[in-house]
Image: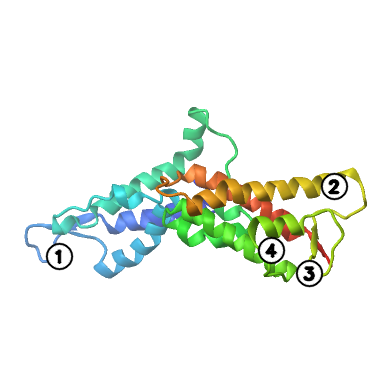
Amino acid sequence: MPIIADPSWAIQQLDSFIALTDLVPLASGRPGRQHVGSKDELNAQAAVVERIFLHLDPQWRDELEMSMNPDQAWNGHRTIAIRAKTTIIRDEEIREKLGDNAPQISASSLHPWAWEGARSLWQSGHFREAVTAAARKINAETQNKLNDRTRSETTLFQDALSANPPAPGHPRLRVIPDDGSATFKSMQRGVMAFAEGCFAAIRNPNSHAANLPELTEHEGLEQLAAFSQLARWIDGASVET
């Protein structure tokens, strides 16, 4: 389950929505039932819980089955809210019993260059496009850091991470200080190779290969985490001109 920063708040919001969808006899005394909450109250609270649903499962709308009965118009949302609440409350227990209580990572905790680039597409379940957007964001931020628009992607990182001294029009990024050591050369070579791999094996296929199936959320998170690590190295590097 994706990490929720404040589970108590999420449960409170779900409880409020569930309470609003309780059914009671019509106030007019006629046969039938109505929701406890007014239409405006339900719409307002639904705007909050739908964000919780989306965080837990980007495909939640696929499971939504709205009743055709007018007095149960929110039945599908109520069912998902009850399930979401149970998932949050019992997540730790479920992961422990299923042997899946390993550390978790949240997309929103990744480096801001990666997450800010990916956020809107990620939240709508377009994981492959989200990773591509993160790659573009990291490329742009690297260009900004170097004040260099003449190169991009693989060529940009190969040039910027070269262990050679800087030259006119060729500023360099130093992941660690250049002390002439084997460690410095190893880091420069390793980060350069990592950047090449991210763009050659992740960004390029995602952008150019036809008819690729959508990534699962987990696959997308792995790819996004790779770009996050690259962003962290580049953001922390010094510029030599």
Horizontal and vertical percent for residue 200?
60, 48
User: Which mark lies nearer to you, 3 or 1?
Assistant: 3
Horizontal and vertical percent for residue 232?
70, 55
- For disc 1, the marked residue is 27
- For disc 4, the marked residue is 142
Gap between marks 3 and 1 measured at Cα: 76 Å
> Which colouring convention does the figure follow?
rainbow
Q: Helix, strand or loop at disc 2?
A: helix
Gap between marks 1 and 4 measured at Cα: 63 Å
Left-right relation of 197 to 159: left
Gap between marks 3 and 2 measured at Cα: 22 Å
Sequence-first disc among 1 and 4: 1
Which disc is residue 106 wearing?
none
- For disc 2, the marked residue is 185
Q: Helix, strand or loop at disc 4?
A: helix
Q: Residues within 10 Å of mark 1 (few under 14, many from 20)?
A: few
Gap between marks 4 and 2 measured at Cα: 20 Å
Q: Which amino acid type is marked by label 1?
A: Ala
Q: Are marks 4 and 2 in contact (CB under 8 Å)?
A: no
Residue 207: tell me if it is visible.
Answer: yes
Q: Helix, strand or loop at disc 3?
A: loop
- For disc 3, the marked residue is 169
User: Which mark lies nearer to you, 3 or 2?
Assistant: 3
| Residue 27: quarter of image | bottom left
Gap between marks 3 and 4 measured at Cα: 15 Å
Left-right relation of 175 to 119: right
